[in-house]
Image (spheres, helix red, strand yellow):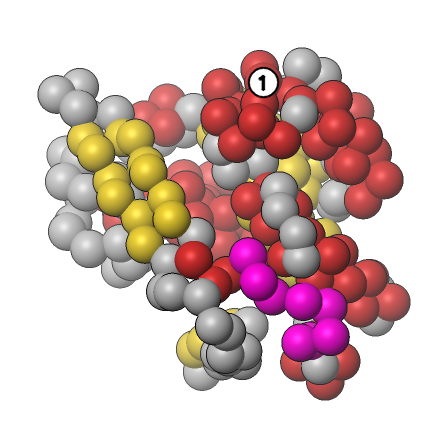
Amino acid sequence: MTTALGVVVFAVRGTGPTGAIAVLIGADGERTMATQRGASVGLRPDDLREEWLSGVKLIHVPAYSLFAEPLASAARAAISLVREGDGLLSIDLSSAAGLTAYGTSRMAEELRGLAPDLLFATMPESEAIGLPMESLARVAVLKLGRGGCRVSGHDIPAPQVSQVDANGAGDAFAAAFCAAYLHGATPVEAAERAVEIASNMVSRTGARPG
């Protein structure tokens, strides 16, 4: 949960190990991530507190959170609580490999049921789902890496920067887009802001925007 003062963490203790991720970067700068999700997949609906989500205007859910139980049920419960308060739902498809393992038809059906307001995907993720993203969400955002993004039929180019560290760029992009959209920006305006923030971030070391 984010506030004007930063991030508030509501921790739930579990018996599993802390999650870990290994990021492998090829000679072409492309990244492959190997994850051990640890205790995160053990989050249960009963672990949530309604007051944690009271007043939340938008919930952003990575598709990873829908791949395994009981975390998937907890994610759906959190979505329901936010939706009951008229909040928006944003989903990031997260991983082409993860979508394939989960079942792309199964995920497409899940998206139809959840009806996200915002849907983020890379080109491989979009191709894996096998359906036009615009048919699955009110606003579909295709992330194109160094090429910027595509939204509402518009290509938003990224500024030319010297890439130092691309880790976290997709998350920074989604966060900037969601924040701008919540503050009244059009999808194109939100995309322009998101591309600016993500491009600034990859030009420095450390997975955090400047």
Q: Nearer the viewer, residue 28 or 143?
A: 28
Residue 203: x, y in percent? 18, 43
Q: Quadrant of the N terminus?
A: bottom right
Query: Is label 1 in a helix, a strand or a loop?
Result: helix
Q: Height in image: 138 above or below 56?
A: above
Say which quarter of the image contains residue 29: top left
Q: Nearer the viewer, residue 96 or 53?
A: 96
- Look at the image and tell me whether residue 183 can be seen: no
Q: Quadrant of the C terminus?
A: bottom left
Residue 12: x, y in percent? 54, 78
Residue at 50%, 79% in the rendered image:
13
Say which quarter of the image contains residue 147: top left
Residue at 49%, 19% in the rendered image:
124
Give the total number of marks visible in the rendering. 1
Q: Nearer the viewer, residue 64 or 5?
A: 64
Residue at 55%, 44% in the rendered image:
64
Q: Which residues are magenta?
A: 41-48
Query: Label 1, on which residue?
Result: 128
Q: Height in image: 181 above or below 44?
A: above
Q: Height in image: 190 above or below 16?
A: above
The crowding category of the residue bearing disc 1, from other C-alpha atoms within 10 Å (few below 14, some 14 to 19, many at least 20), is some
Membership of 83 in magenta stretch: no
Q: Residue furthest front?
A: 15
Left or right: residue 26 versus residue 198 is: left
Left or right: residue 89 versus residue 145 is: right
Residue at 14%, 40% in the rendered image:
164
Left or right: residue 154 versus residue 166 is: right
